[in-house]
Image (cartoon, rainbow, N blue to C red):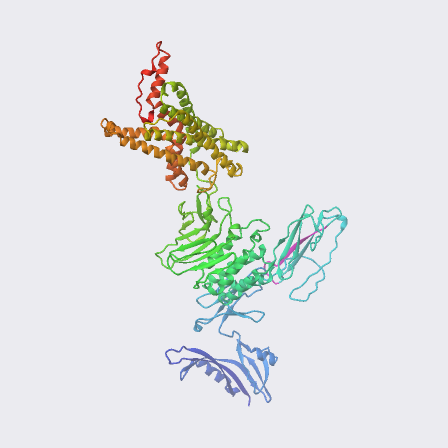
Amino acid sequence: MKLSKGIILLFLGLFFKVAVAESFTQVYWLELEIESSLYDYVVELLKEQKQIDIINATVTDIKNTTDCTLKETNKICSCMPGYNWREDMCQNYDCCNNSCTLKLNDIAVCLPEKRGLITIKGPQKAIDIGSSADITCTPPDILGEVKWFLTDVKNKTTEITEGKEAALTKAASTKTNLPETNIVKLKDISGSWKESNGNYLSYKLKGTIHCVQKKEAETVTCTFTNTKAEKNRIRSQTVEIPIINANSKFCEGEGVWPITKNDYTAKLSCTYNAVGLTSRNCSNQKWGTEISSCVITDLHDVQLAVEILDKGIGFIKDDAYHLFRQIQLSTIKETFNSFSNIDTTVVIFQAMNSVSKQQSNQWNDTIMPDFVSSLSNSLNDTRAWKNPETKNTSLSVPFLQTIEEMMHNSNLNSNNSLIYNNVKLVLCSKAKGEHCGGFNSTVSTDDSAVVIGYQNIHEILPQYDGRRLETNILSVIVNNTNNNHSNRVEMKFDYAEKRERNHVMYCVFWDVNKTMWSSEGCKWGGASNPKLCTCEHNSAFTIMMSQDAETLPYMKELTYAGLGVSIVSLVLCLIIEFLVWDTVVKSHISHFRHVALVNISFCLLLAHCGFLASPDLTEIPSNWCSFLTVFKHFFFLAVFFWMLCLSFVLLHQLIFVFEQLRKKVFFVLSITVGYVCPLICVATTFIAFENGKENEYYSKETCWLIYRGVLKGSIFSFVIPAITIVIVNFFTLVVVILKIVNPTLSESKARDQKDVARSMIKTIVFLSPVLGITWLLGILVLYLDLTQKPYAQIVGYTFTLLNSLQGFLILLTNCLGEKKVCDALMKRFKSKQSVKPKNDSSTKATSSVMMK
């Protein structure tokens, strides 16, 4: 009796009654041995069984997969439509076709042609060169959340994640783009081809060049044709081979560099432990500079590993520590300091941070030591940052921005500072107002922050306002955990101690949107707190000093106008004194006062002329500038010392009322004080400052003494005597005012309060110009910085106007404002019109103490 066996595939869905358990599917193969006459009946019967319920399980989807016919010694089996043999059956029994002869005890199992639980869809046709292919893998919904893995040719299995070439959807499917095959682009060529050892093919062809034609170059074209492709069937590449003829210009071989034709570039593969090329141009029969694109092999391996992660294969958190460690070890190698290595490092950091964000991964404390060490090592030689082709250091900008982005994508908890030669990382996280920082700068924030200090990156960053940066850079990333807090950052830079007088400090940050330095949102602490910078955002910060000092607008014009008026006034004053001398000088007191007034006017006139003698300082010879400085220094000091003589005369008159000072004594003392003392001061200063050396004793830009700070510079050889004399003169003025306020008993009966007030005002107005009281404003001018607006501007303009017009004020107050002088001047003019001269002796002196 002929028997037939059928292998029936049963899918058993087991639904457990336990509340926490989920249903799952199991597959069983059941072998039924039946009579051949009953075969069709049994098959139809099984088809009618849609579902069979048993204890805690349900049998569904009953299908006939394999049909076998029993013989005496073996059995012949075949797969039903839609099924094929298992791989082991195909290999062990050599029955990959439908019919297979087996032993009686062997189990014959055919599996569905579409086996497994995952549905894979891919391109049905050949893939064209240069194109990509989408592969979609879809699991059944019953599996829920799934993980995807990819096994490479090295049998390394890595989990698939989100990336450039993989995408996971909520339906738990994945798409993978096949990477583009590395192809050599060549053109049509015929010849013999020979396969070389290794994982590549080498195509060689010998060609003939005819020297008679004297071509400058020969063009060779290779082409590959993909016969199965529908598009992009042909890929070609043309190579130009230069030919050196007898009259050709070329560069001689030099070391490893071969003979190279003029205007061509020779290229060599990198040496051991590096990948890439080194090129060198031959121009005008001279070798150019070597341009290397070589990258350390270890660093290149890291880049390849990161590229795989970027495609969506693997998790960055699993490889981060190893990758950062390998980068750090690469940066300490002697061959690291090159533009190509630094550029590769920046690219790696950018890619790693991109992958980290894609995978919602934050950098932690474990990788920071290697990371910060790598940054510091990269800055060991800032010359290596110069691009050999463009000659700029613009790579520093993406370097800085990438670091900031990585810090924004970090979750650091350690309070330990990471300090290296060129980079310092500090986590400010303890309390509000905590100070931290590095490299001669400190930071204070309202919230926790990551502060990175850079020692020398300012040397390679873009310039600010056409000038190179001069101090270290602070990168501050505030972790604003409280929405009520702002990103306000206070920084103090010790570099501001070098600030020169009247120079503004600019607090600037790197504006990523404008790709330039900007001061928007930042405020400088001013002259009272020059180190302080306050900014309202996070970025990389630094401080810069203005190139030019602050100036007062139209100050030069006002000064020269005032000096011109003063010079004319002083000339008039001397002429008036000459005309009225015999008339007004009748007593010792008047003689002393007018002698001092004439000398004050004369010295001030020469000093003002000295200023006007150098209007265009750029065209003045150095020797002439030195002479003008000494000239002005002497006569300005002489003005003050003659003011001191006048002050002594007034004090002597007030204190020793009944004792008259002899003219001979006054003459000796006044000449000594008025001219000898200034001469000694000027000579001593000239010798002390390297015999009047430029930029020590005087400045060629101003032809005047130099100010270098408080009590620093030659200017104080003028300021200290002048201020001392002015203070003494101010004391004299106070004594005179007290004398007016507290008159003698006989004088007080005849005067009321209004007369006293008028006398006080008159005294101040008349004595201030000749005693130099207005120069007291010079103390404020020295103390105030022009950056302290508007006070410095008010004081500066007032001081300039009063002192440039000092000669004019002397003319008004001590010449034209004195009644005796005016009367004498009027008499002199009237005497020319009158035949009978008047007797001067009839005039009665009525001047007060200050007019005698």
Out of 458 and 480, give the one closest to the viewer: 458
The residue lying toward the viewer, choosing from 662 and 217, is 662
Quadrant position of the N terminus in the picture = bottom right
Q: Residue at x 56, y 69 (%)?
A: 152
Residue 342 visible: yes
Using the image, determine if residue 539 lies above or below residue 306.
above
Give the residue furthest to the left: 749
The number of numbered badges drawn on the structure is 0
Residue 308 seen in render: no
Q: In the displayed orientation, state which residue is furthest to the bottom.
A: 1
Q: Residue furthest top?
A: 835
Name the spot of residue 145 as percent of width and height, x first.
44, 71
Is residue 237 part of the magenta span, yes or no? yes
For the magenta stretch, what is the residue range? 228-243
**In-image side of 749 versus 499 (left or right):** left
Q: Is residue 398 above or below residue 157?
A: above
User: In screen coordinates, is 632 left or right of 777?
Assistant: right
Residue 759 position within the rendered picture, expressed as x and y whole percent measured from the top left: 29, 28
In the image, 512 versus 97, the foreground residue is 512
Please, is residue 201 above or below residue 545 in the view?
Answer: below
Decide if residue 779 is on the left or right side of residue 747.
right
List x then y, in percent, for residue 826.
Answer: 35, 17
Q: How far from the left and from the top, in percent, is residue 312?
A: 51, 64
Picture quarter containing residue 23? Answer: bottom left
Residue 720 is covered by the magenta coloring: no
Where the C terminus falls, by quadrant?
Answer: top left
